[in-house]
Amino acid sequence: MRERTKHHSSKARLNAGVIIGVIAILINVITVSVYIYQANIMQKQQHASAWPYLEWLLIFNEEDGLRLEVKNNGVGPAIIKQTLVRLGDKTIALDSLFSQLIDTDYFPHVTSPIQNRVLPAGASITPFKISNIEWAGKVNHALQARSFKLKICYESIYGDQWVSSGTTVEETICGSDK
């Protein structure tokens, strides 16, 4: 009879050991899951802390003329990768805008390239400015008549990419035809 009790008590100890081991493994799996979840949240916070938000406006008034202003309203730098200009259904390069639009580049204006530049948070650039009111009016009218559209593809320092179509920004991949 003693043997039976001894065998039964070692079996109970074995079952208790297995139960404790399973509980320990379960606790470890839960702990690792929590750490993975926290790391994911921290990565998202890190990306959000360097999020650029690029917007552009075409501004025309009778005192200052016409200018295209690109501003980074985000909290991180914007790395400008590509620009896409459309006049109606035709895609053109930004540096050939005026020759396509009004058949000349020879008038008083200032241009500045925007592609392959880094725009810090809160900063703005002016890709073109026309101070002469007569020329500004002609160009503004031609832009409106030809349905001027500009898309600027940019990315954050983490490689996240967006396309700005004025005051509308969409997360996408540069080079995709959206």
Image: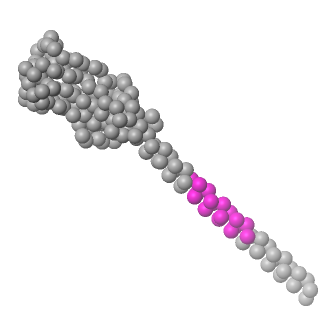
Please report the bounds of the magenta region as a residue range.
Answer: 20-36
Instruction: Tell me if residue 51 comes above or below residue 29 in the rendering.
Output: above
Q: Position of residue 8 (x, y in %)?
A: 83, 81
Indicate yes or no whether the magenta region holds residue 129: no
Lateral position of residue 146 relative to residue 111, left or right: left
Foreground residue among 66 and 16 = 66
The C terminus - image quarter: top left
Instruction: Tell me if residue 127 comes above or below residue 30 in the rendering.
Output: above
Q: Position of residue 125 (x, y in %)?
A: 30, 27
Which quadrant would residue 38 be assigned to in this image? bottom right
- Magenta segment's dominant SS is helix
The N terminus - image quarter: bottom right
Q: Residue at x 10, y 22 (%)?
A: 133
Foreground residue among 32 and 114 = 114
Q: Position of residue 132 (x, y in %)?
A: 12, 19
| Name of the residue lying farthest toward the right | 2
Q: Position of residue 139 (x, y in %)?
A: 11, 23
Q: Residue at x 18, y 31 (%)?
A: 58
Lateral position of residue 157 relative to residue 166, left or right: right
Does residue 134 appear in the picture of this structure? yes
Lateral position of residue 90 relative to residue 73, left or right: left
Number of numbered labels in the structure image: 0
Q: Residue at x 77, y 71 (%)?
A: 17
